[in-house]
Image (spheres, rainbow, N blue to C red):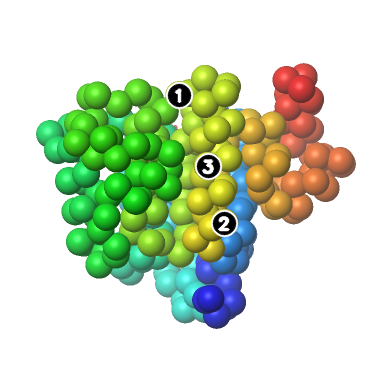
Amino acid sequence: MRVTLGVMRVDDLGCTIAGRTLLAGVCFSIDHGEALAVLGPSGAGKSLVLRCLLGLAPSEAKVTGRLQWEGREVSLADRDALAQLRGRGLALVPQAAAASLDPMRTVGAQLREVCALHDTDGRPNERLEEVGLAAEFADRHPHALSGGQAQRVALALALACRPALLLADEPMAALDCVSQAELVELLVRRCAAEQVALVLVSHDLARVVRCCARAIVLDGGRMVARGPLAELLAAPPEPTTAAMVLAAARRG
Ligand SMILES: Nc1ncnc2c1ncn2[C@@H]1O[C@H](COP(=O)(O)OP(=O)(O)OP(=O)(O)O)[C@@H](O)[C@H]1O
């Protein structure tokens, strides 16, 4: 059982490139075992928020704002300090999982490497089983995985770091509807089981509505709404959220 100091609090995150404001005034906090959705239309700045938190914003970007990590202040401009949080602190499940895997090495070798790097439990078979993949996947190379299987391997790799917080950047984007629902359900179930906080990026409110209690909504790099997802759904406070609610309702 972890002490509940809160995992992360982000205040006034901003990002500019060549004088162009790409993010401004983004604020949120998240606690252990909690799930927060980061919503918004394409180009809203959702992926950029995750890159800034990981210290992986484009090299020409100027990032501003403050981050409190388990009660400790970290400047969002300090890429080295943010890099220290990667692994046991923050781990990422990327949008295009297959491209994030090493094509030359088996799934098992990649899992063992991550476990050795972060000094965590290194049994690939168990890690694969947790994400619904049979032990034989440990011997496969990434080219022998379907899109959904590659996303599950990426999830297993991220969880193998034993992070306090998982950042998931539309991990279901490339999958069919049934596989999307299964992957989101798996993601949320695993995070809850391991008391890992989850920040789930999506442009699709319908996809996150059952698994995230709270959300922030971005548009044009600005945070236009924030609060319990049920409240945003019941009474969208501004047009971007209203459009997302309408789109979710149309899809049933
Ligand atoms: N390296 C970069 N240089 C200049 N602009 C960039 C760079 N990376 C991202 N941007 C811009 O930042 C804005 C936000 O992009 P981002 O990828 O975060 O959007 P998103 O909300 O994740 O969109 P999507 O849902 O389509 O993935 C976009 O206008 C994009 O063009």
Q: Earlier in the sequence, mark 1 or mark 3?
A: 1
Q: Which residue is mark 1?
A: 174
Residue at image x 42%, y 69%? Answer: 75
How many angstroms separate mark 1 from mark 2 (CA)? 24 Å
How far from the left and from the top, in percent, is residue 122?
25, 58
Residue at image x 49%, y 31%? Answer: 172
- Look at the picture and state if 175 lies above or below 75: above
How far from the left and from the top, in percent, is residue 142?
24, 30
Residue at image x 45%, y 24%? Answer: 174
Residue at image x 70%, y 52%? Answer: 214
- Rendered image quadrant of residue 96: top left
Bin the neighbour count of mark 1 within 10 Å (Cα to Cα): few under 14, some 14-19, many 20 and up. some
Q: Which residue is mark 3?
A: 186
- Amino acid type assigned to the residue bearing label 1 in the image: Ala
How far from the left and from the top, in percent, is residue 89?
40, 65
Q: Is residue 218 visible?
A: no
How many angstroms separate mark 1 from mark 3 (CA)? 16 Å
State the SS at label 1: loop
- Amino acid type assigned to the residue bearing label 2 in the image: Ala
Q: Are marks 1 and 3 in contact (CB under 8 Å)?
A: no
Dot label at residue 192: 2
- Look at the picture and state if 162 lies above or below 2: above
Q: Is residue 103 visible?
A: yes
Bin the neighbour count of mark 2 within 10 Å (Cα to Cα): few under 14, some 14-19, many 20 and up. some
State the SS at label 2: helix
Bin the neighbour count of mark 3 within 10 Å (Cα to Cα): few under 14, some 14-19, many 20 and up. some
Residue most extreme to the right: 235
- Look at the picture and state if 168 lies above or below 11: above
- Amino acid type assigned to the residue bearing label 3 in the image: Leu
| For residue 112, side relative to residue 221 (left or right) | left
How far from the left and from the top, in percent, is residue 123?
27, 55
State the SS at label 3: helix
